[in-house]
Image (cartoon, helix red, strand yellow):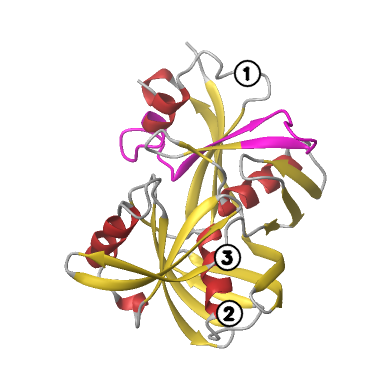
Amino acid sequence: MQKIPFTKMTGVGNDFIIVDNRADILNAFDLAEFARHVCAPHVSLGGDELMLIEPPTAGGDFSMRTINPDGAEVKMCGNASRCVARYALAHGIAGARMTIDTLGGPVFAQVEGDRARVQLQLTAPLDLDHRLDVAGETYTVCATQVSGAPQAVVAWREVARAPRAQIHRLGAAICHHADFPAGTNVNFVEALDRHTLWQRTFERGVEGETLACGTGAVAASVIAATRGWVDSPVRVQVLGGELHVSFARQGDAFAEVFLGGDARFIAEGVLLPDAWR
């Protein structure tokens, strides 16, 4: 019976299935189909994403691949990169400071105890006044990309109290709007004070609300700073806990953008064939 070793980790409520694929243990698998099966809740292990650790591709300590529950491979995931960094340190793949190769570019990470901090980059200009018509209503959507991950940010008063169904309905409509042909994560945010945001996210590929989104927290923080709502550092409160974003800013230019938060080990074991059938 074939068995695939895995580790389950969570970063502020985002949960990930991590497989060390440096020895090509998944080379005979259709990875899209494998991810769709093993990420399914209730009938398999369940997770927000399947993360593969593979040999470096661009001079880093190793590379990280990110596959969504719908089977699509995306450029990277912020919270996953924090979990993968802690995994890599615990398993002797890298030291406490490391460089992770991703399709969205290099991610520089540092691990301290159960917390991991990663440096991300804005990889698209800030679009602060994108008007979007959705179901007869016009919304102002701010858009950018964080290390290649597309993000839309929408201001929403008392977002913490918004009905989940409403987050899902509007999030899905914006995510799959014709103006975003490749889809986008949709982050609904409210500034609570000069250093605090509340954020809820509809995630592309998951096709629903998740408990956190790290790249979304970065996008929300820099866009809120550009709007004059917050200053660095920013505490981003999400359903799964709290993330921390810091940055250096000169006008509308941002550098040294860091995302921090906890990264927890949940379980280790083996996936059995029924998990991916």
Q: CA distance from mark 1 to mark 3?
A: 33 Å
Asked which secondary structure carries label 3, the reply is: helix
How far across and how far down the image is residue 53, in percent? 64, 33
Is 93 left or right of 29, judged from the image as shown? right
Q: CA distance from mark 3 to mark 2?
A: 11 Å
Looking at the rendered image, the quarter that the C terminus falls into is: top left
Q: Which residue is mark 2?
A: 225
**Front: mark 1 or 3:** 3
Q: CA distance from mark 1 to mark 2?
A: 43 Å
Is 205 left or right of 99, judged from the image as shown? left
Prevailing secondary structure of the magenta residues: loop
Q: Nearer the viewer, residue 56 or 11?
A: 56
Q: Dot 3, how many residues are within 10 Å of its Cα: few (below 14), some (14-19), or many (20+)?
A: many
What kind of residue is marked 1? Asp
Q: Is residue 239 visible?
A: no
Labels 1 and 2: the sequence-earlier one = 1
How far across and how far down the image is residue 10, in percent? 53, 51
The segment highlighted magenta reads 37-64
Q: Which residue is mark 3?
A: 218
**Dividing the picture into quarters, in which one does residue 146 lie?**
bottom right
| Callouts 3 and 2 close, C-beta under 8 Å | no
**Front: mark 3 or 2:** 2
Q: Dot 1, how many residues are within 10 Å of its Cα: few (below 14), some (14-19), or many (20+)?
A: few
**Front: mark 1 or 2:** 2
Kindly identify which numbered label has been placed on residue 24: 1
How far across and how far down the image is residue 115, in percent? 68, 59
**Residue drawn at (52%, 26%) of the image:** 270
Q: Dot 2, how many residues are within 10 Å of its Cα: few (below 14), some (14-19), or many (20+)?
A: many
| On screen, residue 277 above or below 198 | above
How far across and how far down the image is residue 1, in percent? 47, 10
| On screen, residue 25 above or below 154 | above
Labels 3 and 2: the sequence-earlier one = 3
